Each structure stands twice: as C-alpha cells, then as structure tokens.
Amino acid sequence: MATEKLYWKDAFATEVDARVVAVADWKGTPSVVLDRTVFYPEGGGQLADRGALVVGDASVPVVDVQVDDEGRIHHVLAAPWAHGETTVRGAIEVARRRDFMSQHTGQHLLSAALAVVCKGETVSSRLGAESSTIDLDLVTLDPRALADAEALVNERVLADLDVVVTFPTSDELRALPLRRAPKVSEGIRVVTVAGLDCSPCGGTHCARTGQVGWVHATGIERYKGGTRVTFLAGARAHADATRKEAVLRDLARELTCGVLDVGAAVGKLRSDLRSKTDAFAATRGELLRLVAERVHRERPPGAGPTRIVLHREQEDLGGLRSLAAALAARPDVIAFVGARDPEKGDLLVVVERGSGVTEFDCGKWFKERLARGARGGGRPERAEGRLPPSMSLEEET
C-alpha cells in the first residue's frame, strides 16, 4: 500500500499521527512504513526530512526517508523498531523543512528566470545541505546575464506572489505552459508561480514567494559540457552575506578605509607590491650576475668543461634558474645550482650547460638518478628537479 503524502497537501505540516503498517528495512538499515506521513522522502533533487517517531515515552530518530518502487515511504531509523504495528506520532525537523522549502521554491524561480533571460534550460538541480546547484544546457553563461536573472527572481520574491499547487487533469495539463515535461504519467503535481514558472514537481514548496527570501547565485562553472550555477536562498543567502560583510569590515578596518573602498585599497596595495616586486627582481638579478662573475673569477677556464657546484641559502627556484643561466653564460661551464627546501628537506637543483659544452646532457643527469628518489628532467642544455635529502649535490657531480 502506497503511503499517503500529507506534505503534498500542506508543506507547513510538521507533525502527524499515523499507524505503522510495516516494520521493514531500507538497504539493510531498520525502517518502518506508515499509512500516512509528513516526512518528505529524498527525490527530485531534494534531500529527505529528518525527525523522530514517538511511541509513549520512546522516541526513535528518523535519519533518512526513502520511497520504494511500490510507493511505500520508508522512515529509516537510527535503531531497530521494537514496537510492532502501532500508532505513532511523527515530527520532522522544522528548520530543515523550512530551509528546503525556501531552496526548492528558489530553484524553481531561478530556473525559470534563467530560461527567460539566458535562454538556458535546466537539465538537473540538486538541493544540498549547504548550497544548491542548477545545471544548464549552456556551454557558457555571462555573469551579467546571471545577475539579470537573479534580479528578476528577487523582484518576484518581493512581489509576494502565490505559489499554487494543483493536480490537473490530462486536458488541463496539456493547456499549461510547463517549463519542462513531467517525469511520471499519473498523479502529476504542478507548482505554479504566476507570470514566471509552471513546473511538474513533487517537492515541498513555500506558499508565497515572499517566504523564499533573497535568492543569490554564488558561482558559475563548466560542468559536463554545460554550465552549473550554485545558489543560496532564504536564511542561507542571509548567512552568506553576513559572513562576507564581516570579512569586508575586517579588511576595511585593517586598510583604514570604508567597506565600499576596500577594492580600491587592495588595488593600490597590488600596484605597490608589483612595483616593489619588480625592483626586487632587478636587484636580485644584478646580485646574481655579480655572484656569477665572482665564481667565474675563482674558477677560470681550463682544458675541458668547468663544473661549478654552488649552494644557495633560502633561494627559490626562480633565483636558481637565474643564477644557473648567469653561470652558463660562459661557454665552458656546466653549472649545478642547488638550495634546500626548508619544509621538505629536498634539494632543489637546476643544471645548465654553456654553449661550448656538447658532451654533457643535463636531462640525462636527472634521469640517471630517478631510481634513487630524484625527481625532475629536462633538455640536454638545461634541466631542473629535486634530489632527496639523502643525496649530496657535491657527491653527485
């Protein structure tokens, strides 16, 4: 026997007196089936309700709700059911239900607005525990168009329009401007917001758009050849805005500016940093050139290639590359330049040969050490990578 779905009649109902008609299990976890329920089972992109079933003084948590192929709704329990087929009082977590009502109605509004403004059809949607997503059949989505769709949604939210639920006949259904085709052929339930959306849906919804609260899109990304939009509605959108405003206020305090001036202040900091970084790079480049000149004086050319092994303290990979290039500017040099990684203990190494050295292969030098834990490689003229802490650059050269 299919369970009577009271949440279809009244999404604001949070308690029910019902009878246990079957003690069962859902995929190995204890469950009970009631003759009627206010618990929404997972489906249509919406997560299940949670709550408890109360018998006398006993309260058994309902941790999940699922529907089987026979239409029976399984109230999945945290512990085995020991009360038989009896009358129970079921109560859902009200905050969770109201949250999902807001997210689901918000999803309908945003999907409809995206269809109108962006000509993007919703392929699927998912109402997550923290954020929700809409997948569109669009390869790209202009953020400005998404902002326009969001504005349309919130305009309709402020208008506080009726959210109407109906079970139309076949003839009535054919006359409706459905945004998408129904997935079932019988007992089709349609949720309508006048002037914006008309969709078949079995989920729980607000009674008026004003109950949805603010709807805000927080992200766009490519997903399976289409576009995924992440959004928040109601209390989630408010909490997100509050957290972000707190961060902005902290930044404004640190930067000694107004909240709306943070962008300009950060831009100035970036410009100043870029100037200082360029000046530092020029100074370091000059320093490394002088280091190379000193090393060249200490190691004058000989009969064959001159191998120069040089360790640097607290040098990054960019500095090692620059120094190796400066050393290998002399044609007879094979330069081995290394610096210890302070976190991992590995030795960062850059190997580069001068233009007059042809018999030495820098890439092959790394390849010969891979079996002993080295990582890296490159071309015959130049290579870079890491030697493990157990290896010494002097011993390897």
Image: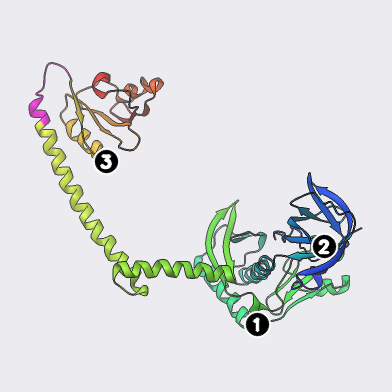
Q: Is residue 284 left or right of residue 193?
A: left
Dot 3 or dot 2: first in sequence order is: 2
- Cα separation between marks 2 and 1: 42 Å
* Quarter of image, res 325: top left
In this rendering, which labeled residue sits more in front, label 2 or label 1?
A: 2
- Cα separation between marks 1 and 3: 59 Å
Q: Which mark is residue 56?
A: 2
Residue 229 at least partly seen: yes
Near mark 3 (Cα within 10 A), the count class, few <14, some 14-19 or many ≥20, is: few
Q: Which mark is residue 244?
A: none
Q: Is residue 300 magenta?
A: yes
Residue ID for mark 3: 318
User: What are the residue bounds of the magenta stretch?
Assistant: 295-305
Q: Identity of the amino acid at label 3?
A: Gly
Q: Position of residue 138 (x, y in %)?
A: 59, 60
| Residue at horizontal 86 percent and vertical 62 percent from the top | 185
Q: Identity of the amino acid at label 2?
A: Gly
